[in-house]
Amino acid sequence: MAKKYFINTYGCQMNVHESEKLAGILADKGYEECEGEEEADIIVFNTCCIRDTAERRALGNIGVTKARKKENPDLIIAVVGCMPQQEGAAENIKERFPYVDIVLGTRNISMLADEIDKVVASRNAEKKRSDKKYRCFSRTLPEDYLDIDEHTPALRTSFPNAWVNIIYGCNNFCSYCIVPYVRGRELSRNINSVLDEVKRCVNAGYKEITLLGQNVNSYGNDLDSDVNFARLLHEIDKIDGKFRVRFMTSHPKDLTEAVMDEMAASNKICRNLHLPIQAGSDKVLADMNRRYDTARYLGLIDGLRSRMPDIGITTDIMVGFPTETEKDFEDTLEIVRKVRYSNAFTFIYSPRKGTPAAEMEQIPYAVKQARISRLIALQNSITKEISDTYTGGLYEVLCEDIAPKYGQKVCGRTDSGRLVTFDGTKEDIGRFFNVRITQSKSASLFGTKEGEIE
Ligand code: SAH
Ligand code: SF4
Ligand code: F3S
């Protein structure tokens, strides 16, 4: 009988895609996915450390596996990704969870296959369960990472969407953020490798390609050629076939006019952009080391909307950064009113050890919580108002999944990124439909099909 794997994924889309690579590595070794941890021969935790809550969730679940290991001493437990890449974190995991067998950092996941063999070999050789040794490669960021990565298989799990990495790492060092410390410096993939992967996905029937990077707009900066993100979009747009292109995340300091022009000229690139603002006060933005101000940001919004009046713009906003005063927070509310995002991901600032902002004097948690509640209430009312403008209109929707909550229904998104629920079956997944919007409920739209788009 084939051995079984179960992967727990935390964090961003980058991690979701890296879990597809972990699944690819495990499938190559003959493992099959199972429904729950209890059936697994190997449990992998692909972790995130962007906020304290993300870390605590993973640590809690790793703790639970102690009992499983008692029941099944052959079980292999691996902790990989961003969390063990932090300074001192691998040692901490080793101390708290001595039954963890394998620890791998963000650029070492391709070692999983070999590490499994080594764990099995050492168990067979010694046959003593008291062996607490485990191998940890979390602090090394190999130079030849891109070459290794090109040969790591991926078992895609998000049809009709295919995730495609274009750049790894981050050079920005926003003062609150752990990512540059755990993901290393920017490394852009070769443009031909990216284009080949997009073509392979389109030929295999994927209908949406989402380009991934911590900052997609820096794509190409580290390459010798004159390749940049606008040029990559231009080349992807020329690939034959009916498919959509999305990308994330864009940093406002690096979003260029050329990228906006490519978006506007293309009928494959969605009129949808995620452009994190983080805060609406220029002082806080400077303290965050974001390297743009609100004037620059609002200029970008104008540039996008003058080219694409129907564009859906979403954002990330953080409240409770150490230097944020009540007035600064009100500036954030003000910019949210000005921009009118179709949706916003809102976060309470969480101090990350080793980052400059964690050393500053912190704001009481109750203040942060009160601020985020006000921000969410404001954004919800804007989201609802924008949703209402869709009612009665006809939109092209890519059917992405069944919507079990609503019975015989499916869901998908408009070009602008709005979620629509409509009548359909699982045979509709991966097909484009014209959908008439009949009802709106805060962030969700409901509609009826008026024919397929070939
Ligand atoms: N590279 C992306 C963001 C990746 S992290 C960018 O620059 O936009 C996703 C979001 O998590 C960030 O946009 C930010 O809003 C939030 N975030 C990052 N660090 C955080 C922290 N220490 N506490 C709370 N939220 C944080
Ligand atoms: Fe973090 Fe800033 Fe890099 Fe985004 S751009 S990953 S917020 S350091
Ligand atoms: Fe988390 Fe790492 Fe992504 S810290 S948000 S999984 S890059």
Image (cartoon, grey):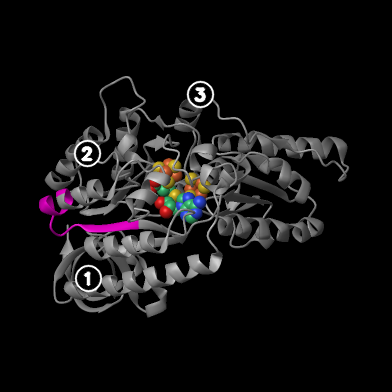
Determine which residue is flagged by label 1. 386
Instruction: Say which residue appears at 35% left-offset and 67% top-offset.
Output: 426
Q: In this rendered view, identify the residue nearer to me: 30 or 374.
A: 374
- Report if residue 350 lies within the magenta region: no
Lower position in the chain sequence, tag 1 or tag 2: 2
Residue density around tag 3, few if under 14, some if 14–19, many if 20 or more, within 10 Å: few
Q: Quadrant of residue 55?
A: bottom right
Residue type beneath disc 1: Ile
Image side of residue 217 versus residue 60, left or right: left
Task: Magenta stretch: give its range.
Answer: 303-315
Instruction: Say which residue appears at 37% left-offset and 79% top-offset.
Output: 406
Q: What element carries label 1?
A: helix
Residue type beneath disc 2: Thr
Q: What element carries label 2?
A: loop
In the drawing, what numbered circle is on residue 256?
2
Residue type beneath disc 3: Asp
Determine which residue is flagged by label 3. 144
